Image (spheres, grey):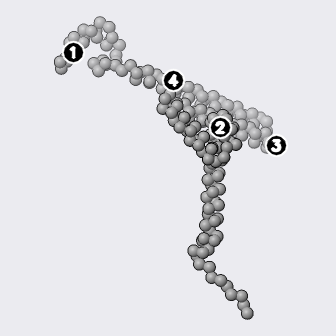
Amino acid sequence: MAPQMEYVSKTQHYLKVKKPLLERQRRARINKCLDTLKELVAEFQGDDSIMRMDKAEMLESAVAFMKKQVKQANATNFTVTMPMDSFRHGYMNAVNEVSRVMAATAGMDVQTGKAVMVHLGSEYNRLLQMSAICQQKEMVEEESCSAPMSPASSGYHSDDGEESSAAATSVWRPW
C-alpha cells in the first residue's frame, strides 16, 4: 500500500511556514535598524553608555536626545552648522577608510597613495573654506536684515546727512 499524501492548503502552509519566516525577517530588520540608531546616537552624544542599554532604554534615550537637538536647533539656529559638522565627520571617516584600504592593499604604489591623500586633504580644506565663506555671508545677511532701512530711504549714501533732512521735509506724506 502506498503512503497517503496529506493535502496542505495554502492558508495552512502560510501559517506554518511563511508567517514565522516573515516575522523573523521583520524582527531582524527592526534589530538592524535599532543597532544602527544606537551607533548613531552614541556617536553624536560622544557617550558609549547607550551601547549597553536594552532596546527600550536605547529608544527612550534616542528620543530624548533628538528632542534635545530639536530644542537646541530652534533656540540657536543650530540647523545651519549641524549638517556641515556631520559632513566633515563623515568625510574624515571616509578619508581614514581610504587610507586604511590603501595601506592594506598589496602592491600599492606609495606615490599614488600619497597623491590620493594629498588630493583628499586639499579638497577637505577647500570645503572648509567654502563653508566659512558661506557662514560669513549668512552673518552679513542677518546683520543687513536686522537693521532695515526706512521706507523712504533708497539705500544710497546720499540719503544720509544734510540732503536727507532737506528731502524729508519735501516728501509728501499722507498725514
Is disc 4 in contact with disc 3, using a CB cutoff of under 8 Å? no
Q: Is residue 139 above or below residue 100?
A: above
Q: CA distance from mark 1 to mark 3?
A: 81 Å
Image quarter where the C terminus lies is: top left
Q: Within 10 Å of the Cα at label 1, are there few (<14), some (14-19), or many (20+) other Cα atoms?
A: few
Q: CA distance from mark 4 to mark 3?
A: 45 Å
The location of residue 89, given as percent across then percent down, is 64, 34
Which residue is tagged 3? 107
**Could one spot residue 91 in this view of the protein?**
no
Which residue is tagged 4? 136
How many labels were placed on the picture? 4
Which residue is tagged 2? 43
Location of residue 53 (image quadrant): top right
Q: Which comes before the other along the chain, label 1 or label 4? A: 4
Q: Which comes before the other along the chain, label 4 or label 3? A: 3
Q: Which comes before the other along the chain, label 2 or label 3? A: 2
Question: Given the image, on which type of amino acid does mark 2 rest?
Answer: Glu
Q: CA distance from mark 1 to mark 4?
A: 37 Å
**Could one spot residue 152 in this view of the protein?**
yes
Query: Which mark is nearer the camera, 4 or 3?
Result: 4
Is disc 2 in contact with disc 3, using a CB cutoff of under 8 Å? no
**Identity of the residue furthest to the top in this view:** 162
**Identity of the residue furthest to the bottom in this view:** 1
Query: Which mark is nearer the camera, 2 or 4?
Result: 2
Location of residue 166 (image quadrant): top left
Q: Within 10 Å of the Cα at label 3, are there few (<14), some (14-19), or many (20+) other Cα atoms?
A: few
